[in-house]
């Protein structure tokens, strides 16, 4: 997933400069909304609110200029952006996000990327696992998030 994401990221980065490129935004939504929604629902435990926040996060994403400055894959950038913006939107509602601490989470690999904002190679060194194993663990955790969100 992460390796395939590199090609999509470069295609997306090249066409995202036109913020009215509906086709590109639809592709990003189709590809990444389930992961983003799963992340949000994990932090809110409220399906309606998670749907509202997902919409707000996409609108925020379109307004902000984070896409051209990717230092990692689009997948990880959107994951971090979703996480940070969900916290912001929940706090604006006077709510405390759930599952913020890695020790309390069922998603240790995802949290590794959230809390330490490291790349795949750094995660491999830190965890003493091969990059392929980290990717497999991330996929398993995202599948768990997706299952939880339905």
Image (cartoon, rainbow, N blue to C red):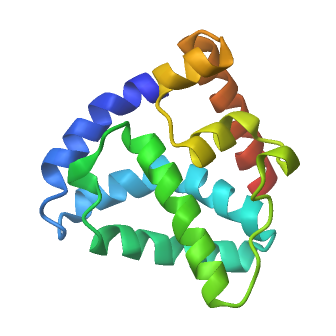
Relative horizontal placement of residue 77, taking residue 108 as reference (left or right): left
Residue at x-position 71% and y-position 79%: 48
Q: State whether residue 40 is above or below residue 91.
A: above
Relative horizontal placement of residue 104, taking residue 91 as reference (left or right): right
Q: Residue 19 appears at what percent x and percent y?
A: 19, 68
Q: State whether residue 74 is above or below residue 100.
A: above
Residue at x-position 50% and y-position 23%: 122
Q: State whether residue 54 is above or below residue 39.
A: below
Judged from this view, the residue extending furthest toward the right is 104
- Residue 150 visible in the current orientation: no
Instruction: Determine which quarter of the picture holds residue 149.
Output: bottom right
Total numbered labels? 0
Residue at x-position 46% and y-position 31%: 119
Of the pair 28 and 44, the residue shown nearer to us: 44
Q: Residue 21 appears at what percent x and percent y?
A: 18, 63
Of the pair 50 and 129, the residue shown nearer to us: 129
Q: Quadrant of the C terminus?
A: bottom right
Residue at x-position 62% and y-position 21%: 126
Q: Residue 31 appears at what percent x and percent y?
A: 45, 47
């Amino acid at each position: 997933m992460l390796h395939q994401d590199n090609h999509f990221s470069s295609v997306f980065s090249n066409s995202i400069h036109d913020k009215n490129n509906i086709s590109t935004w639809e592709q990003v939504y189709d590809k990444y909304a389930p992961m983003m929604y799963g992340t949000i629902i994990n932090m809110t435990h409220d399906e309606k609110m998670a749907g509202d926040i997902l919409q707000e996060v996409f609108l925020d994403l379109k307004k902000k200029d984070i896409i051209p400055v990717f230092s990692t894959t689009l997948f990880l950038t959107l994951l971090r952006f979703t996480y940070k913006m969900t916290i912001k939107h929940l706090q604006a509602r006077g709510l405390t996000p759930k599952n913020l601490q890695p020790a309390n989470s069922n998603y240790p690999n995802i949290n590794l990327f959230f809390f330490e904002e490291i790349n795949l190679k750094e995660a491999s060194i830190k965890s003493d696992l091969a990059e392929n194993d980290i990717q497999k663990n991330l996929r398993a955790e995202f599948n768990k998030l997706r299952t939880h969100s339905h």
